[in-house]
Amino acid sequence: MRNVRVFFTKKGRMKFASHLDMNRLMTRIIRRSGVPIWYTEGYNQHPYITFALPLSLGFTSEYEIMDIRVTDDDFSNSMVMEALSTVFPEGLKVIAVEDMVQKTGEVAFAEFSISFESNDKDFATALNDFLSQESIITEKKTKKGKMKEIDMAPCIKSFSVETGDCVVLNIVLAAGGEQNLNPTLLLAAFGETPYYTVCRKMIYNFAMECFK
């Protein structure tokens, strides 16, 4: 038995699938694929599936990670990829299947590309100035439902604002730990913005290396 890491993209209408929806969908997909996956023990047995960093509803992604546990050591990674590729629905695409290298606790940053339906240079300048502040204070709801004040500036690893046919914000934010920052919270603190779409481009470890 071995742990296998599945890398895939999530685009199109699949962006409307929540994390809970993805858990249910992947359970059905893996059962249909024929991949010999390990099932959890106990009364309510289900396939062992975990995601390195759940994606927010409405976001697309070019780098999603799902971990499974294969019970047959002779069932190679290429066989897993072929089996899953035949049953993945439109909007999901397997891009690689590899042995696990890093633990999910090593996830530290996520890179996003945010495209705004505007080419207003004044908006781009204001956004750049806002993100360049030494301190960006807002309120965030805790797991217990209470509101607490946080400073988002330390959670911004890097960013750039590009202008052209539209304004594009490329930003790397803290992810996976207590400082996990959703880009929508950051933009909400900025204020009113044009309509935008969010794509997660990559997930990194603490050394800013591609998480694998």
Image (spheres, rainbow, N blue to C red):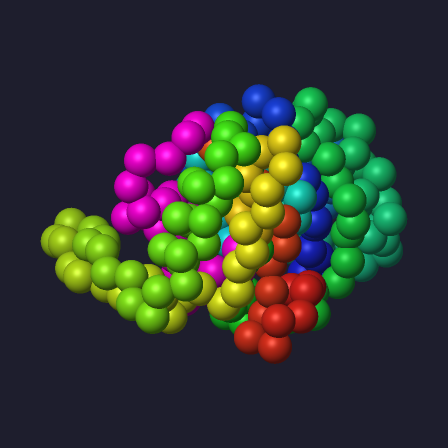
Going 57% across and 22% down the picture, which residue do you hit? 13
Residue lying farthest left? 146
Tag count in the figure? 0
Q: Is residue 70 left or right of residue 23?
A: right
Residue 25 appears in the rendering: no
Q: Is 184 in the magenta?
A: yes
Choose top left, top right, bottom left or bottom right for residue 28: top right
Q: Is 135 in the magenta?
A: no
Residue 188, given in percent of the width and then of the height, sits at 30, 43
Q: Give the range drawn in magenta.
A: 171-195
Residue 82, given in percent of the width and then of the height, sits at 84, 38
Q: Is residue 175 left or right of residue 199?
A: left
Residue 192, given in percent of the width and then of the height, sits at 31, 35
Going 75% across and 40% down the picture, which residue do you hit? 94
Q: In the image shown, does 157 or 100 lie closer to the viewer?
A: 157
Going 15% across and 50% down the picture, which residue do you hit? 145
Residue 203, given in percent of the width and then of the height, sits at 60, 58
The N terminus lies in quadrant: bottom right
